[in-house]
Amino acid sequence: MKNKNLHISTPSYQSEFVKIDSSLMLLRREHYYPLGYEAIDTYGDFSILAFADLKEKFLILKSYDSSIELSGPVVIFIPKYTLVHWKMLTNHLKWEAYITKKHDRIQSDQITLFENEVNKPKSLIDFFEIINYGKIKYQIPKNVINGPHKLANDIKDYLDENYSEKMDIKDISSRFNLTNSQVTKIFQKTFTLTPVEYRTKIRVFNSMFTLLTDVKDLSVIDIAFQTGFSDLSRFNKQFKKITQTTPSKFKFK
């Protein structure tokens, strides 16, 4: 039987992954940042419910033209394929995140901040119960369907659905009847990242989740190819750039 706990340590963070059951995983993270650090996280094909106890004005979450200052006890839901810009007002964060790839019973597709009396889930049923019926404090739409962000969001949706396919910027441009530079400019203006940078991050985060939940004992190279990388060396390089460690560290022994 495989271990239910996995520890990962790098110079800037320590993580513990705990398998609650076959569909729900708990991540405990302690992370050190340079003061004033900003990060753009791209969440792949998985949903997250995170808990943290923050100091005053500890963290700012930005999405599109909206932003939230997070402080005190925080419970936040982040839907699959969400792109979030974080600004750190501290150099040290600790949090817990419950992660699943089961989305069929989730009714919301918005970043949601809940009232802090929410209990931590002990099962996938608890996870769904909190997200669908928890007392909402604040919401930010994950997608903007109108206005200046719409085209950028349409490109993002296309990348989300086809991230593992072999395609370059020309294929994306052709799809939307735009030039290569127009696609990059429109996407980057809304999301800060270029389409290629975004797709690379999605591939890495989806490969990381596959490594953590793999029950077929796939090799690292199989998972790299499955998530769209055609070159193992590039996969290892991009994976280490984003996670600060190697793919093999994310496999339960």
Image (cartoon, rainbow, N blue to C red):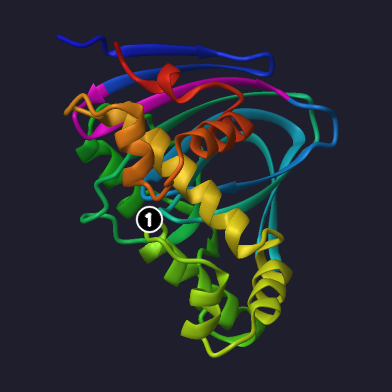
Name the residue type under label 1: Ser
Which residue is located at x 28 percent, y 21 percent? 19
Give the image location of residue 189, x and y in percent.
73, 71
Give the image location of residue 12, x and y in percent.
68, 18
Q: Residue furthest bottom?
A: 177
Residue nearest the observer in this picture, 234 or 61: 234
Q: Is residue 10 left or right of residue 33?
A: left
Report whether residue 85 is seen.
Answer: yes
Give the image location of residue 172, x and y in percent.
51, 75
Q: Relative to 6, is 204 above or below?
A: below
Q: Main secondary structure of the magenta part?
A: strand
Quarter of the rendering occupied by the C terminus? top left
- The stretch drawn in magenta includes residue 24: yes
Which residue is located at x 24 percent, y 29 percent? 218
Which residue is identified by label 1? 164
Disc 1 crowd, CA 10 A, few/some/many (<14, 14-19, 20+):
many
| Magenta residues (range) | 20-32
Report whether residue 144 is seen.
Answer: no
Give the image location of residue 239, x and y in percent.
53, 33
Which residue is located at x 62 percent, y 54 percent? 197
Quarter of the rendering occupied by the N terminus? top left
